[in-house]
Image: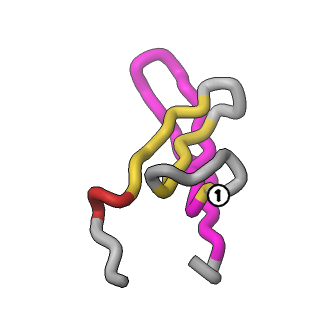
Amino acid sequence: MTENASSFFVHDNITDGRFELRKKGANHENIISFASYERHGNTVIVPHVETDPQR
């Protein structure tokens, strides 16, 4: 089965300070990738991105 972009969504996890790429219908443990961020006024800095290589 081929997945397309509509199978995923980005969640802004404000508590952990990161954007999370998740598969639709998946639970919290099934995060595909995340990008940590820091907010400074109107600027968002993304110093770290991590993806599970098995996905």
User: From the image, which quarter does the N terminus lie in?
Assistant: bottom left
Q: Which residue is mark 1?
A: 30
Q: Position of residue 32 (x, y in %)?
A: 57, 62
Residue at screen point 35% across, 60% down: 7
Residue at screen point 47% across, 33% down: 44
Q: For residue 37, what is the image quadrant?
A: top right
Residue 33 within the segment the image draws in magenta: yes
Magenta-highlighted stretch: main secondary structure? strand
Residue at screen point 71% across, 33% down: 16
Q: For residue 33, what is the image quadrant?
A: bottom right
Q: For residue 3, what is the image quadrant?
A: bottom left
Residue at screen point 53% across, 22% down: 40
Above or below, 44 against 24 in this view is: above
The amino acid pointed to by label 1 is: Asn
Q: Nearer the viewer, residue 23 or 53?
A: 23
Question: Which region shows up in magenta?
Answer: 32-52
Q: Nearer the viewer, residue 21 or 28?
A: 28
Above or below, 55 against 42 in this view is: below
User: From the image, which quarter does the C terminus lie in?
Assistant: bottom right
Above or below, 13 against 20 in this view is: above
Q: Nearer the viewer, residue 31 or 26?
A: 26
Q: Position of residue 39 (x, y in %)?
A: 55, 25
